[in-house]
Amino acid sequence: MKKEFNHEKIKEAIRTILTELGDDPDREGLRETPDRVARMYDEVFEGMRYTNDEIAEMFNKCFEAEKSRDLVLVKDIEVFSYCEHHLALMYNMKCHVGYIPNGKVIGLSKIARICDMVSKRLQLQERICSDIAEIMQKVCGTEDVIVIVEGEHSCMTARGIKKSGAKTRTSAIRGLFDTDYELRNEVYNLLK
């Protein structure tokens, strides 16, 4: 496990930002903002404390299912993250995670927890997909994993080009999902 965040340094940095933006961090509405932001960062960036291996270990709750080789798909797992380029919110994000069991199945809530923890990092949407896929492969002991993430990015909608409603869709396609087009299309059809 990685070290805890230094709340005092984060609070000091937020005070500096507020001052440099031209506001008074000691005025009533902002007085407690540095502490609130430090506590929020502790929550929304929790995943930065853990490696993919540690997340896999944390959520490794599987059950034997020797005969099951049928597709398991959990769709519409809502998460949010922050773009590492602008510290801007990635929102309205949904993760869709599928896999083919290889002797064991993972508890379904653990899939959502993996998606949540991976997203609680400074991220790229593409990396969210590959990190979830890597962790699923480790936990489930299968190469056959597909992860699709779609979301909106405030670095595109609230600033810069300002194109609200623009969605980004990324995927990580591993094992049979990469070579078996019928299987991949089955996932896409189930997501409609």
Image (spheres, grey):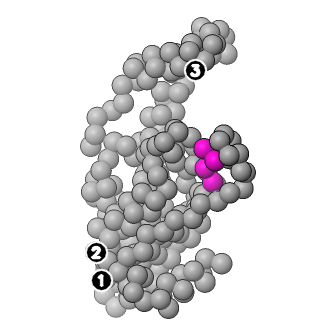
Mark positioned earlier in the residue sequence (1 or 3): 3
Amino acid of disc 3: Thr
Foreground mark, 1 or 2, reads 2
To which residue does mark 3 refer?
33
Mark 3: secondary structure: helix
Which residues are drawn in magenta?
Answer: 152-156
Report whether 136 appears left or right of 54: right
Amino acid of disc 2: Gly
Residue 141, labelled with which disc? 2
Marks 1/2: CA distance?
8 Å
Q: Residue furthest front?
A: 161
Assign the magenta stretch its main secondary structure: helix
Packing grade of label 1 (10 A; few <14, some 14-19, many >=20) is: some
Amino acid of disc 1: Gly
- Asked whether the residues under the numbered discs 1 and 2 touch, taking CB atoms below 8 Å apart as contact, a structural biologist would say yes
Mark positioned earlier in the residue sequence (3 or 2): 3
Quarter that holds the C terminus: bottom right
To which residue does mark 1 refer?
103
Marks 3/2: CA distance?
44 Å
Quarter that holds the N terminus: top left
x, y percent for residue 117: 43, 52
User: Quadrant of the rendered structure where residue 55 is?
Assistant: bottom left
Task: Identify the residue at horizontal 29%, vertical 67% (top origin).
Answer: 138
Report whether 18 appears left or right of 98: right
